[in-house]
Image: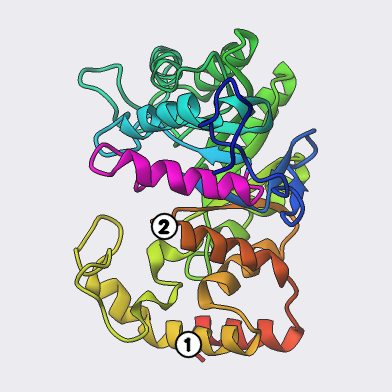
Amino acid sequence: MKIDDKANPYRYMADEARYDNMQYRRCGKSGILLPLISLGLWHNFGFIDTVNKARNITRKAFDHGITHFDLANNYGPPFGSAEETFGIILEKDLGYYRHELFISTKAGFDMWDGPYGNFGSRKYLITSLDQSLKRMGLEYVDLFYHHRPDPYTPLEETMLALDQIVRSGKALYVGISNYDAERTEQASKILDELKTPFIIHQARYSLFDRWVENGLLDTLEKYGKGMIAFSPLAQGMLTDRYLDGIPEDSRAGKEMTYLDKRQVLQKIDNVKALNNIALSRGQKLSQMALSWILKDKRVSSVLVGVSSEVQIVENVKAINNLEFSDAEIEQINKILSGQ
């Protein structure tokens, strides 16, 4: 932490070299550039975690040129607590740099009791964003997502709600998440006709989960939208965490949501084989996994969730080697196909 002026000698001062090494990529055909590595606040920012730890991680990220911080109304646990923690971080640390930050949040999953706290109605989306802004102490977010498709609400209602949110000044841009290619195309047509600044789709994408390659990336390219990948490390499987077994204090060891021991054991041979390729490239497995996604220029950024400052530093190093030889791609595809 650097020393500020005499008026406030203890305020956090960002590293003056924070933009020297990070790379930024245009988000579709919009005016927005995103850092290749963005920070997701899904884990380690709830009330069950320490605020100081969250502050240290966030400051380290910004010091390395990460300007994009991604939240959702139900991140925590408990629901809403990640946004409240981020509000504290803005107040104590990053608020001075608000003009340099790109902050996103979402709504679409279960958030509160009763018939209006879920999915994609105008009532839910606008109410949820109002609550998110209050928790973070913000007048607007840079980006607001509909978090998942709603099988019950007409798509037009959901898209018109996103349009109203922008026109009300509560978000500068909008996005969608977890939509398939067909509904993404439908949403694009509606929002483009409304001239709503829809710029991005957030989707699960990793070496172990490549569904976006089956039409979604092509659709996004067709309509000039960016893509940001979440869970790029497959909940930690694509790291060196499980190379020598399943630690008791790991996500799989604790049988946490989205990852259990069975999943790790099913993939461990692939993980070890991929790790050998990463080492031959001079990378850690996690770095290669991020680089592999970013080799496709249609991907604007990857979202990482970390539990320490060290992991931020290690993940950022992935951008130093984004090129893959034909032989490396062939090897990786053989491993993933079980050949």
Q: Amino acid at mark 1?
A: Gly
Q: Residue at x 37, y 84 (%)?
A: 243
Q: Residues within 10 Å of mark 2 (few under 14, many from 20)?
A: some
Q: Position of residue 130 (x, y in %)?
A: 43, 13
Q: Is residue 86 visible?
A: yes
Q: Are marks 1 and 2 in contact (CB under 8 Å)?
A: no
Q: Nearer the viewer, mark 1 or mark 2?
A: 2
> Looking at the picture, which amino acid does disc 2 mark?
Ser
Figure check: 11 above or below 2: above
Tell whether 326 sits left or right of 204: right
Could you tell me residue 316's position as x and y percent?
A: 61, 61
Give the residue at x 32% y 80%: 266
* First to last magenta residue range: 43-66
Quarter of the picture containing the N terminus is top right
Q: Secondary structure at mark 1?
A: loop
Query: Circle 1 sits on which residue?
Result: 338
Q: Residue at x 58, y 87 (%)?
A: 279
Name which residue lies at 51% across and 83% down: 337
Residue under pointer 2: 308
Q: Up-down: is 311 above or below 335? A: above
Task: Name the N-terminal-most of marks 1 and 2.
Answer: 2
User: What is the distance, in whole Å, between disc 1 and disc 2 at their CAs?
Assistant: 33 Å
On whether residue 203 falls in the magenta region, the answer is: no
Q: Residue furthest front?
A: 6
Left or right of residue 28: residue 88: left
